[in-house]
Structures are given as C-alpha cells and as structure tokens.
Amino acid sequence: MKATPPSEVHVVGGGLAGSEAAHQIAAAGVPVVLHEMRPVRLTEAHKTDGLAELVCSNSFRSDDWENNAVGLLHEEMRRAGSLIMAAGDAHKLPAGSALAVDRDAFSVEVTARLTANPLVTIARHELTGLPPYDWENVIIATGPLTSPALSTALANLTGEDSLAFFDAIAPVIHRDSIDTSIAWFQSRYDKAGPAGTGADYLNCPMSKTEYETFVEALLAGEKTSFKEWEASTPYFDGCLPIEVMAERGRDTLRFGPMKPVGLDNPRTGRWPHAVVQLRQDNALGTLWNIVGFQTKLKHAEQVRIFRTIPGLENAEFARLGGLHRNTYINSPKLLDGRLRLKAMPRLRFAGQITGVEGYIESAAIGLLAGRFAAADALGLAAESPPQTTALGALINHITSGHITSNDEGRSAPRSFQPMNINYGLLPDLAAQLTHDKNGQRLKGPERGREKKREMSRRALADLSSWLAAGTSPIMERSA
Ligand SMILES: Cc1cc2nc3c(=O)[nH]c(=O)nc-3n(C[C@H](O)[C@H](O)[C@H](O)COP(=O)(O)OP(=O)(O)OC[C@H]3O[C@@H](n4cnc5c(N)ncnc54)[C@H](O)[C@@H]3O)c2cc1C
C-alpha cells in the first residue's frame, strides 16, 4: 500500500524566519507553500521582491562561536542545516571576526534555492486576515512590519494587550557584573507583592550631585532619531525615553523611574536622593533590566553613561535600550513550547514577531518552527533543543524563560521586550571554573572568557546529542 504523502505546511512571510522555516520543512520531505506579499505590497523598510531581504545592516554580527553567543548560534544553525547560514557563508564579505554578507547576492541565493526546490511553492500575495480554516499547519513569520490588515486580525485573536506595535527596551545587565557592595536588594517599602519576597529589586543609590551629573549626561548624550515612518506611529503609552523625561524638568526622573521613596540605603540608613532600580529579567536570575530606562541614546553613549551609575561601574550589558516600530506578540503568555498559539494550535509563530531580536535570532526561530511544523505533518515527536544550546535558550526565553511582571510585581504583558541571544539566557555551568584546561588558575576577566568558551563547548556537544537523538524530523528520515 502506498503511504499517504504528508499534508502541506503554509508559511506566511518570506523574510529571514519564513525562508528558513520553508527550507527546513522541505528538507524533512514535507511540501510547503511560502506566502510573501512583496512585490504586491511592500513594507516601509523592504525595497526588493527578494526573499530574506536584509532591511538595514548587512552584518550577521560575530561569527566567533567560542566566545560570542551569536557566533555560537551561527554554528548551531550551520550544524542543523540552515539555509540562511549557508547563503550567508556563500556570500560573505571581509569584516574581521563578524560575518558580513553581500545583501543582494545573499537574498538572490535564498530565493533561487527555495524556487528550485520541488517541495516549495512560492505564492506572492498578502494575507489580509487569519489563515483560512483549511490551512491546518501554519507558520506566521511576517516580521516587525507585519501588514496592518494581518496585524489587526492578530490583535483581535490574541487581545489588544498581547500584540505590541513598538518595543520600548530598557538595558539588560548580567547579574554577576553588578556591584552588590553598593547596590542593595529591596522592594519599595519592603512590599512583597503577589510573587515577591520584599527584596526583589537591586537598587543603585545616587547623591544629589551624582543625580544632577547623570541628568546632564542624558541631555547631552547623542541620540538616534526615529525613521520618518516610525515618528507617526503612536507609542507613548507610559514608555517615554528617559532622556525625554529628563528634558521635561530636572526632577522629572526623580519623581518617575528614579524615585527613591521607600528605599533605605543600608549604608546610610536613609533614602538616597535618587535610585536606579534593576529587576530580574529571566527565570535563571542571570539577567536584570533597568526599570523604566527605555532610551533612544546611541549604544556607545548608553554604555558610557550607565556605567556612571553607582554599582554599575563594571556593568556588562546583555542588551542595550531602544525604541522601534516593531510588531510582536506576548509569546510567554500566548505560545506553547513548540511555538504554537495555545488558543489555536494550528497556528505557529516564528521570527521577530515572537519577540526575538535580530536577523539570526529570527532565522533561528524560523528553523525551529519549521522543524516542529514538519514533525507535526509527519506525525513525529519533536523535542526542543536543550536549554544549554543557543537555539534552546532562545526558544526557552520567549516561551517560558522571561519573567513577565510590572513595577508592582503583577503580570504585565508589556514587560516582555525583544531579546538578542546572549550567554545570560543559557544556564550557568554546573561548577565554578577555577582552572583552565592546562591546570592554570583562572583570574578576573580570563575566568569570564573561559566560562563562555566552556558554555559554547557544552552547547555544541548537547546540540549534537539533540540532532542525533532522532527527535528532529530531518535526522529521523535520513537515518
Ligand atoms: C527598519 C528595521 C531595521 C532593522 N535592522 C536590523 C539590523 O540591522 N540587524 C538585525 O540583525 N536586525 C535588524 N532588524 C530586526 C530584524 O532582525 C529584522 O527585521 C528581520 O528581518 C526579522 O526577520 P523576520 O523573518 O521575522 O521578518 P522579515 O524579514 O521582515 O520578514 C517578514 C516578511 O513577511 C512579509 N509580510 C508581512 N506581512 C505580510 C502579510 N500580511 N502577508 C504576506 N507577507 C507578509 C514581509 O514582506 C516580509 O518579507 C531591523 C528591523 C527593522 C524594522
């Protein structure tokens, strides 16, 4: 008897995530229809009809898998047969340790490889509402500039609060780089709140002079400007950039996010003049965000100015602040561990719309969504990669690793903000590193570097086991 062929998967959006997802699905032997609205309709940033168009920089960032988390993600994706990485490698340009690509040749290569694949059909049209009911296995990968008609349909489906049109990112700092001999743990007036202990925040105190110098630096700091089409998008719902607050008056921040009331500095026994508060950002407790510090300051300026905050002199930033036009869903609330919408499991999400940030992170979630969708079509189980891998850490962060809470510790959808891959999303090593491979005692920064290398080695070993375990549809079919 002839086996029934697997039913097709529909992927909406032929960007970084959708192209990678379509490739992974076809590689598993499952037919796929890739729906892309360009050139019928363009976004404000795309200029061509090519698949996987890079809308801004032509860099995939660091390619150093041993020392950099995005380099590690590159390497894991290569090992998982990524089309985006193969096309990037084929069209790389000289850029030191970064992987920069010839954007046109890269997009042409992705388009040509998908067009030539007999299992892939490319349909050029805009999806203007929810996918039709006879599409049983769908991936929505329409990106940060999802067309308005589809955005409206998604907002109606998920609830207004669960779809954001702007991100308002406050910087996130590695916990082990915060100086707790200066910063102290305390919630305002020691209030525990529903999920807290009464000591849920790290507080960095400022004297009057320190505060005034800080405000001056914010005012003088170099800022990035909104793009013309971003400026008209309404977003000011309680998320003003700190430098805009500073412009409104010298004390505005002191009555806003830097309010010191109810916070007793254990070193002085008094409330400081102003306070910068940090709140735990991920369940692992390795990352902490600066509360209310969304900003349009340039990245180098953020590092320079925020390191003047007492307790943050040696801060290592996992993410810097920003404000952008960005359509994304509240994934920790809406998605299950296989990227399916809990309320409508025939719909999966992938790419920037899930709340990851960056070309490679978007493609990585496309890779996983494609594998999960192919496994469903084939009736196979699909395990997520372990959290010790960059792929596993990223999906874990968007589906369950992020802590969703507002200033009072209550659940708040807007506290989930887009995230790049970084080592803080991976669980710490089981044991502290004290010596290197050659038995030499590790000191200071070298210990940090060796820790990253060890986490990278662990990630690739665990990825191999995942790929070999047969829980990925591609490996299972070729075995
Ligand atoms: C202006 C801007 C600049 C950015 N610059 C960078 C950068 O320099 N580096 C970086 O790493 N990241 C950058 N990003 C963030 C992000 O990495 C990219 O947007 C990335 O392309 C996201 O990949 P994606 O696949 O999720 O979405 P996209 O690559 O945008 O793909 C989504 C696709 O869906 C299509 N689509 C949308 N709606 C519909 C619909 N209703 N029906 C059918 N098709 C639809 C779009 O035409 C598009 O082709 C930038 C984002 C923006 C908005």
Image (cartoon, rainbow, N blue to C red):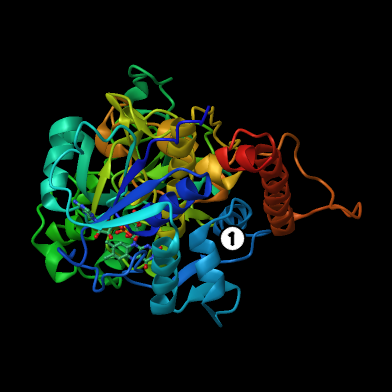
Q: Is residue 150 left or right of residue 71?
A: left
At 45% from the left and 36% from the top, the residue drawn is 5
Secondary structure under tag 1 reads helix
Question: Residue at label 1?
Answer: 71
**Closer to us: 354 or 453:** 354
| Residue 425 visible at all | no
- Return the x and y of residue 372 as percentages of the image width and height: 47, 36
**Residue 202, quarter of the rendered image:** top left
**Residue 333, quarter of the rendered image:** top left
- Return the x and y of residue 32 as percentages of the image width and height: 38, 47
User: Count the marks: how many?
Assistant: 1
- Return the x and y of residue 274 as percentages of the image width and height: 31, 46
At 61% from the left and 55% from the top, the residue drawn is 72
State ligand 1's quadrant.
bottom left
**Closer to us: 247 or 47:** 47
* Disc 1 within 8 angstroms of ligand 1 (CB): no
- Farthest residue toward the right? 439
Q: Quadrant of the C terminus?
A: top right
| Amino acid found under the numbered disc labelled 1 | Gly
Asked if 312 appears above or below 98 in the picture, the reply is above
- Farthest residue toward the top? 194
At 72% from the left and 34% from the top, the residue drawn is 430
At 18% from the left and 69% from the top, the residue drawn is 227
- Farthest residue toward the bottom? 94
| Residue 134 visible at all | yes
**Closer to us: 100 or 262:** 100
- Return the x and y of residue 318 as percentages of the image width and height: 48, 52
Asked if 419 appears above or below 283 in the picture, the reply is below
Asked if 106 appears above or below 452 in the picture, the reply is below
Label 1: how many Cα within 10 Å (few below 14, some 14–19, many 20+): many
Q: Is residue 199 left or right of residue 341?
A: right
Asked if 178 appears above or below 469 in the picture, the reply is below
